[in-house]
Image (cartoon, grey):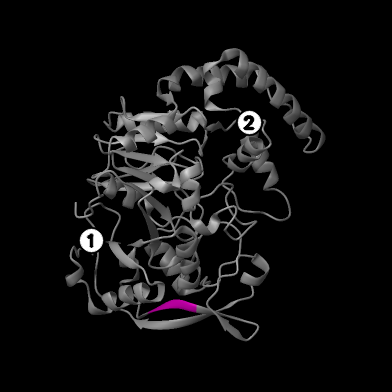
Amino acid sequence: MLFKIPDASVWVVLGAQWGDEGKGKIVDLMSEDADIVVRYQGGANAGHTVSFDGKTYVLHLLPSGIFHENVVCVIGNGVVLDPLALIEEINIIKNAGVNINGRLLISHNAHLIMPYHKLLDKLYEQREEKIGTTGKGIGPAYVDKYARVGIKVIDLLNKDTLCKKIKKNIESKNEILEKIYHTEKLDVEKILNDYLDFAEKISEYITDTAVYLNEAIKKGKKILLEGAQGALLDVDHGTYPYVTSSNPTAGGASTGSGIPPTKINGIIGVIKAYTTRVGEGPFPTELKNEIGNYLRERGGEYGATTGRPRRCGWLDVVSLKYSIMINGIEKLALTKLDVLDELDEIKICTAYKIDGKITEKFPTDPDTLSKVEPVYETFKGWKEKTSNVNSYCDLPDEAKKFIEAIELFTNTKITIISVGADRKQTIFK
């Protein structure tokens, strides 16, 4: 392990594009030198992939540090938790021989995803203007959270409170389902019994994680804060309305964990050597051609959660510089460099042309962003296999020129380079 986390420090690892950057692998690698890994926002709509020893695991709720037995994994208060998805994931991990006893903590302040959230999510997506959600109930759960009618994890520990809240919420949701969507009413008793059963299965993990984390900081522990999705999908700073319902940006790391901003020591942004996007929304460098198809197939660009094909395009440093700015990203981790191995030439979008004028500013409004014309700088492909390279010096010269160009355009150093899915296929620069 060549990436060392300084003692008594807190680091944020987040996606600097539209998600699917390879955060799972980077967090897994860094977890070898961490004490605690915290998932701070999102829900089961995120898929973080970890590969080692010839096996691949896709995590949706459990932090990516779960495979390191020295690491305590925390699901923070900013997450919306689907108990059914969590229990299924715990069982998969246990069957893989991973011991989680004493290693998993769930914030008592995290909100629960309910069956009506999933149903409403799918019904909303049948509208004329789709957002492209995963249908996992994430958006409706956050809506209830901010409408102050959400059900928290702590409510699972009080049967009377849980019963009261579930009955009240389902009464109002049934009215919407029946009168607006003309669907059948939800079964109150079944949902209540299911969540009482969930309470028995996960109650041992529930605690005040904000207190736990701040006490850990006082003790000098090394903590990683793991984001889901990507900065360009942030509900405040992303390409709204084609965004997620939470804050994947660095600010969300504090609000979603209870760790003060003043205690965060460093921020690492994870990027691909190209750009992808899932769902609807503008995508300036999208390639609807043979190269786009090549990137999709060669890079295995299909959603870890939904299986949907990802839209693919050239690396966009205009959006990347915006992401670096709003997150305060100090270092970059570059993934999937090996996907570009067979290309004759590779392009990087360095600016946009809008109404005939060149700009390096990233417009987040979809109307403007959908009209921009990317301005490219072209690089010669290296036409060599990189997936077996483990030293920066041994990379092809053209690959090093590509990497150094990204550093120059973004004024940010790349410290980790991934040349394959497995842990071992990593270069520390």
Position above or below: 182 against 282: above
Position above or below: 108 against 61: above
Q: Residue 150 carries which label?
A: 2
**Image quarter of residue 188:** top right
Q: Nearer the viewer, residue 28 or 60?
A: 28
Q: Which mark is residue 428?
A: 1
Sequence-wise first label, 1 or 2: 2
Position above or below: 379 against 271: below
Crowd around label 2: few <14 · some 14–19 · many ≥20 (10 Å): many
The reply to whether discs 1 and 2 touch (Cβ–Cβ < 8 Å) is no
Where, quadrant-wise, is the C terminus in this rendering? bottom left
Q: Where is residue 23 in the image (x, y as percent from the top left)?
A: 38, 52
**With 233 as the anchor, is 20 left or right in this view?**
left
Amino acid marked by disc 2 = Gly
Amino acid marked by disc 1 = Phe
Name of the residue lying farthest toward the right? 179
- Residue at image position (42%, 53%) is 14
Describe the element under mark 2 as helix, strand or loop: loop
Q: State the predominant SS element of the stretch in magenta.
A: strand
Q: Where is residue 88 in the image (x, y as percent from the top left)?
A: 43, 30
- Residue at image position (73%, 54%) is 128
Determine if the magenta segment contains residue 347.
Answer: yes
Which segment did they paint magenta? 346-350
Q: Where is residue 313 in the image (x, y as percent from the top left)?
A: 48, 70
Determine if the magenta segment contains residue 10.
Answer: no
Q: Spatial distance from mark 1 to mark 2, Cα to Cα? A: 43 Å
Q: Position of residue 21 (x, y in %)?
A: 41, 57
- Residue at image position (50%, 57%) is 231
**With 203 as the anchor, is 3 left or right in this view?**
left
Name of the residue lying farthest toward the bottom? 356
Does residue 418 appear in the picture of this structure? no
Crowd around label 1: few <14 · some 14–19 · many ≥20 (10 Å): some
